[in-house]
Image (cartoon, grey):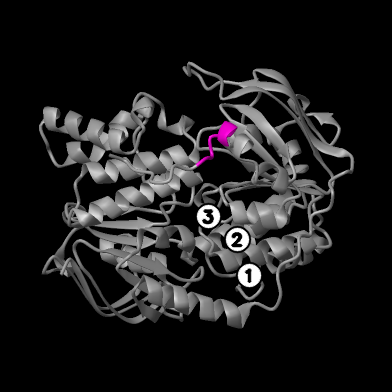
Amino acid sequence: MAINITHLSYTYANRTTPALHDVTLDFRPGQVTLVVGRSGSGKTTLIRCINGLIPHSYKHGTLRGEIRCFEQSTAGLSLAQLARHVGTVMQDPDKQIVAARVLNEIAFGLENIGLPREQIVARVHEAARRLRIEHLLNRDTHSLSGGEQQKVVIAATLAMQPRALLLDEPLASLDLPSARAALTLFRQLADQGIAVILVEHRVTEALRVTPEHCVALQDGTIAFEGDSAGLRAWLDARRGMQEGGAFRRLASAGDGAPVLSFRDVRFAYPGASTEQIAGVSLDVREGDVIALMGPNGAGKSTLCKMAIGLLRPAHGRVIVVGEDAARLSVAQLARKVGYVFQNPAAMLFANTLREELSFGPRNVGIAEDRLQQVIADALETVGLEHLSLDQSPFGLSFGQQKRVAVASVLAMQPHVLILDEPTAGLDSGAAEDMLHRLLGAQRGPRAIVMVTHDLALARRFANRVILMADGRIVADGAPSDTLDNPTVMRRAGLTLDESPTYD
């Protein structure tokens, strides 16, 4: 047995309800285990217990039960000792990246365990080759896209040659070809004898590698355990009970006045040999719900960061609600364009939800007598109206933190809302519910731009799909005109090989 869990329960500090309750599971070498469940069901807590973050980093909670890793109790092991056997890829690559250069990041763990230089160099280049990121080795880590960062973190973990691999939503930031290739790699690692534990919301994709062991968590307990076929049947039965009719597309035709415009915008990161944005022009109009799509590194997030002044174009203009963004401060832009980062840890900072959700509205001048209602509306829109405002956002699950981050931006009542990977950390039901509420909100934004790799999300909610590749727009049209056009998808680098592989 690789990992054996017996009667595991855990309650976070200052919480009354356990995140996990009486969980007993076995994970075997040579198998892929797929763990699924709604946001807040206990999946990430399970990962934290296995890799030792609970109790070493998450202190003062109540932990019961036993975890044995390769026949040894983890109770007496340090994080460093566990890391020699168990590799972890967390939901937010930002939290794992410590080095300024990609090459140094992949080498970091190897240097810490004292491997000879020749061995380190060989392992770094082998891991980079398997992830097809050799071209990134000399890049600064801060200049990478979210998907590129995710690949670097996976490479750094594989370079350690772990006996068990914990993957907490590794596909969240990856485009479809990269996601399928990554899954093929995980399958290959399991076939080589590694115990692979995959926590993933993109269940349909994950099931393509036919996991031998599947677990569904619900409210911190095991709701299902079996094989892939059994999980499909269980999910189909639940879907049949829960569907009360299909979501209708709420987006208008987007024929209103422009609220965000880019005019021949160009941008290159310092030291980069090519432009990250290479002459983009487009209008986001009132009523638009746009899915901005493309392969990792296409320039999607870079373009959006120019809308809020975090990056300034080297050439061209960004116009926000009729004003040149170059003449506005970041604070002034925040009144017009709200940006939700794909990693909520990049946004959350306060000790309580009340402080977190009040900060932005106060800064943009929303009156104190309206503050309580604005916060209540924002929480209701993201489906978190049941939460106490006195609790800490850091005790919430990743998916709940994601929705809090959305609520904190909604509370500022921006004209345009930009969501960078809105479904990362959310199961499909929670993501669709949030977007359904958002698009139906009476005081919602005038236009929404979603940076996403989720084709189903784009088809269901967007009235426009904009495809980017190599810093340029290669298509802009209705979902059926873009996503169903093989030529357009090929130009955007989103075509799929029949058998993607990292060989």
Q: Looking at the image, which residue is at 69% across and 78% down? A: 244
Q: Secondary structure at mark 2?
A: helix
SS under mark 1 = loop
Question: Tag 3: residue type?
Answer: Ala
Image point 57% across, 49% down: which residue? 421
Residue on which the image places disc 3? 424
Tell me the kind of residue under disc 2: Arg
Mark 1–mark 2 distance (CA, rounded to whole Å) = 8 Å
- Give the residue drawn at x 48%, y 43%: 496
Residue type at mark 1: give it: Leu
Residue at image x 82%, y 49%?
446
> Mark 2 to mark 3: distance in Å?
11 Å
Count every numbered label the image shows and give the total. Answer: 3
Q: In the image, which residues are magenta?
A: 490-495
Q: Residue furthest right?
A: 256
- How crowded pointer 2 is (Cα within 10 Å; few <14, some 14-19, many 20+) is rated as many
Cβ–Cβ under 8 Å for marks 1 and 3? no
Q: Secondary structure at mark 3?
A: loop
Tell me which numbered mark, 1 or 2, is placed earlier along the sequence: 1
Tag in front: 2 or 3: 3
| Relative horizontal placement of residue 7, taking residue 494 as reference (left or right) | left
Residue for badge 2: 403
Label disc, if present, on residue 141 of the rendered structure = none
- Position of 128 with respect to 147 (left or right) is left
Q: Which residue is mark 1?
A: 384
Report x, y in % for residue 56: 28, 61
Q: In this orientation, does residue 19 appear? A: no
Q: Are marks 2 and 3 in contact (CB under 8 Å)?
A: no
